[in-house]
Amino acid sequence: MAETLSAPQAERKKIIFSGIQPTGVFTLGNYIGAIRNWGKLQEDYRCVYCVVDLHAITVRQDPAALRRHTLEAYALLMACGIDPEKSILFIQSHNPHHAECAWVLNCCTQFGELSRMTQFKDKAARYADNINAGLFTYPVLMAADILLYQADLVPVGVDQKQHLELARDVAGRFNNAFGKTFVLPDGYIPKADEGARIMSLQDPTRKMSKSDPNPKGFVAILDEPDVIMKKFRSAVTDSEARVAYAPGKDGINNLMSIYSVFTGKSFPVIEEEFAGKGYGDFKTAVGEAVAETLRPIQERYKELMGDKAYLEECYRRGAQQAMAISGRTLEKVYKRTGFIPSGR
Ligand code: TRP
């Protein structure tokens, strides 16, 4: 790792950083929109992936549940193909540099710009009884996550674009004030077929979400095959009964996107495959394609969760590797800020 990062610019692989919150089950939307792509990026980039438990507590968490969800998230990322031999995979709270760097960056971030963050406004409305300071400075911690690793690219969904822009602004401001310290990160925009936005199976005008009160609206990566089949069979469609992509046919369009991602087939090929057939056949085929793809992931997940010692070995090593990189950045940050070196 160290060699790769200090190698001359020309042969240096670009660095990718991304994080995911351990706040419960991961859905097909998370899989298609993020996790699946994280695995693919490992070949061409130096990837650093993080389970962001510090971010999770900006909303009240039950301690036992947070602990469980964090380990589950870690194991699930591995089961989905993130290989701790190829990437750095760690748990955010295991690396103290994130919280330390966030403090310095807090002092370079304006109240006004944090007040404009739409996610803060949404969450403050949703959790009106717990509008804590961490919720407000959440984007600064996210900036620290990214900037500590000198990440060139950050795969994020549209809902995180504003936070990424803030990270760039804060990095630029620090660089201007104290000398070039941080790389300014760019968003990594997946290719069209990789970015498919997955909608609820019950209300295909809304994004698929694990917090959907109707569990039939989302498919979790760990749903059993028969549950997956049932959810797809009861997916909301329309009365036209023709498998064809068309504006306004949100339900069918969504199922076609999912089928396309899981089989690699294009829309015209899918339309041909189901010409003259009803929605019933199509829904069954989508369910089977999804269940089949998820089966080995679920098996691997169970294996990993049955071997806690191995998981622990992986996340401990991940934290060490992460700290080796973030430590160098933090040292520069502290020095430039004017802190006396502690010699630690
Ligand atoms: N805020 C991100 C989300 O909720 C998670 C996250 C935390 C993240 N730190 C990050 C994403 C750094 C990318 C880079 O999805």
Image: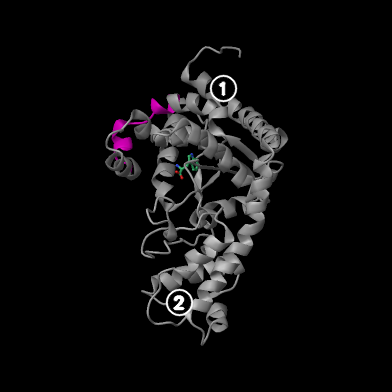
Q: Callout 2, which amino acid?
A: Tyr
Res 171 visible: no
Tell me what residue is drawn at x 44 percent, y 68 percent: 235
Quickly name the residue at label 1. 331
Q: Position of residue 60 (x, y in %)?
A: 39, 34
Q: Nearer the observer, disc 2 or disc 1?
A: 2
- Is residue 59 visible to us here? yes
Q: Name the image quarter holding the C terminus.
A: top right
Q: Find residue 30 and report its horizontal and vertical position in percent.
A: 50, 53
- State the image coordinates of residue 105 (x, y, percent, origin top left): 43, 28
| Residue at point 50%, 32% (across, down) | 64
Compare residues 30 and 341 and report the one nearer the observer: 30
- Residue 219 within the segment the image draws in magenta: no
Query: Is disc 1 placed on a helix, strand or loop?
Result: helix
Q: Which image quarter is the N terminus in?
A: top right
Q: CA distance from mark 2 to mark 1?
A: 54 Å
Q: Which residues are magenta?
A: 104-117
Q: Is residue 169 left or right of residue 6?
A: left
Reply above or below: 295 against 325. below
Image colouring? one colour
Check mark 1 vs ligand 1: CB closer than 8 Å? yes or no.
no
Residue 19 x %, y %: 52, 42
- Find disc 2 in the rendering and name its residue: 245
